[in-house]
Image (cartoon, grey):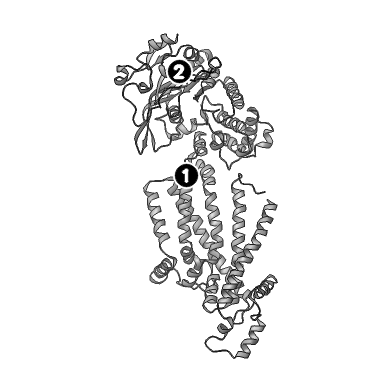
Amino acid sequence: MGRYVIRRLLQMVPVFIGSTFLIFFMVYALGDPVAALFGDKAPDPATAARIRRELYLDEPLWKQYGHYMGQILSGDFGTAFNGQKVTELMADAFPVTLRLTLVAILFEIVIGITLGVLSGLRRGRSVDTSVLLLTLIVVSIPTFVSGYVLQYLFGVKWGIVSPSVSPEAPFDELLLPGIVLALTSLAYVTRLSRTSIAENSRADYVRTAVAKGLPRRRVVTRHLLRNSLIPVVTFIGTDVGALMGGAIVTERIFNIHGVGFQLYQGILRQNSPTVVGFVTILVIVFLLANLFVDLLYAVLDPRIRYA
Amino acid sequence: MTQQYEKAAAAVPLLDVRDLHVEFRTRDGVAKAVNGVSYSVRAGETLAVLGESGSGKSVTAQAVMGILDSPPGRITGGEVLFRGQDLLTMGAEARRRIRGAKLSMIFQDALSALNPVMSVGAQLGEMFSVHDGMTRKDSRDKAVQLMERVRIPAAAERAGDYPHQFSGGMRQRIMIAMALALEPDLVIADEPTTALDVTVQAQIMDLLAELQREYNMGLILITHDLGVVADVADRIAVMYAGRIVETASVHELYAAPAHPYTVGLLGSIPRLDHKGKELYAIKGLPPSLTDIPAGCPFNPRCPRAQAICRTDRPPLFDVAPGRASACHFWKETLDDAG
């Protein structure tokens, strides 16, 4: 197990370098950050050249990248164009997004798995058909539609929740955004657990459990669920990584000052240090989430052993 | 007193299946998997149910155990009397209490029949904690004792292992231990040795026979292996297309079969004195269960078939006491064999 983890961590290095270089290349090489810094005004050529030299922008791209990575590894993510340190932006944004992700994942687990298990156990009955139809509808509606509609209904028309989230983003204000963010994944979790339950309920070991005279409740919880939820848990694990960075639309709709919001602002204003810095962290989060899922898999299924 | 009681108990069979019918709804129509099967088993007795794949031998057992896949399976008629009580009309909870405790089953493929993500100790211990309300620790100890009873080496250390960490023979021993955990009255073994190596097969059958003697259980041995049957069974029921076509004691059946299908089965066993000669095979294939031929279901494959066989379904004729054959020409068959 230990050797496996080390090997996986080493494998992350090339993936990390490749993906960060790509985003670095796209952001820096395709726009002119110095021009962006001056906005609509044309910069004084001498000043522009000085800034370029200060920011190593007159050097070849790979050197710029090397320099940037060196800074990142020493904990310096640079300064956003408004003068704020990128690390300060991160310290504000990541806890907010983490809370939002937590709320979303909780909805996925509680609602998604419950619906999936219920419909899987009653395959072909009306419960199952309506849940399937519902998930199909949910999957087909894009987040910006479901987000605005739910915001209008719950926040504006009925006034149950506040339509936008305050900068502190407490948990209770994140409930509605959490549902919106979770919706698509929730539908997938429902379908995944339904299929898994339906498939496994015909497995030989479930028949054995029934033949042992175990009560139905125990057959389902001890034997069927444990086996069926392995793929679901791994899906939810990878989704944590995806949700941490993928909340741009939801955070925009509800004015949540999280990672997605900062990324959006960064892209909009060509604020390169912010964009590259955040994406770098997200790459790491995603890689670690994947490693965690693979390790969890071995814990859940004793047949899988990593050497 | 006790003697009298034992006599009375012996008179009533442990299990009495009467005229059982099971159907499956499939895309091609209704498959009649079991069509009026009757058999009975007494304490200490071994009944072998013999037949090829699709003859309904496993489905009958599943119906008796109450583990039929339904839907699509459905019991459409008959009775399953266990110690005189009909299991089919019994409440679900009462039936669950019997299942596993009084009436248990050994499955063919222990690897898929055991839960892959649960230690074998936990799977065995579950029997005691659920049925007898034992504490976790006590049931764990009982599980280890059981593993020792079926001669699994280093049982105490291996109780925490998972099914995939055992060899095929050891897994089947665990399956047997699980079925015998609560010393049931009757065990149904569905092809318990089919998935095993030949050398291991004999060990497993010996173990099963030994435990059966020890606990004086009734045993239903479902198999298509005539060699296994000859060694351990007292009586045989041969099934074909969801029906019993012949029942007899092992000696009678091997000495002189009274049904052409049985003749064919016995004839297709490889024998040393037939070396060099072509092995006999029953021609044709078993009928589709959605479209069983009129008359005798075996008539399209039967070397003895006459006009009557294509029109009249033969009932089970009494051949001798405790012996029956569903063939219009059982006399002729018997004479030719003898």
Residue B199 at what x, y percent from top left?
61, 25
Circle 2 — which element? loop
Q: CA distance from mark 2 to mark 1?
A: 41 Å
Residue A57 at what x, y percent from top left?
64, 80
- The mark closer to the camera, 2 or 1, is 1
The disc label shown at residue A199, or none? 1
The disc label shown at residue B12, or none? 2
- Three-letter amino acid code at the position of disc 1: Glu
Circle 1 — which element? helix
Protein chain holding label 1: A
Q: In this rendering, does residue A84 appear at all?
A: yes
**Same chain shared by disc 2 and disc 1:** no
- Three-letter amino acid code at the position of disc 2: Val
From this view, report whether residue A279 is shown above or below residue B87. Answer: below
Q: Quadrant of residue A88?
A: bottom right
From this view, report whether residue B234 is shown above or below residue A266. Answer: above
Q: Quadrant of residue B212?
A: top right
From this view, report whether residue B125 is shown above or below residue B285. Answer: below
Relative horizontal placement of residue A136, taking residue A17 as reference (left or right): left
Q: Residue at x 40, y 12 (%)?
A: B333
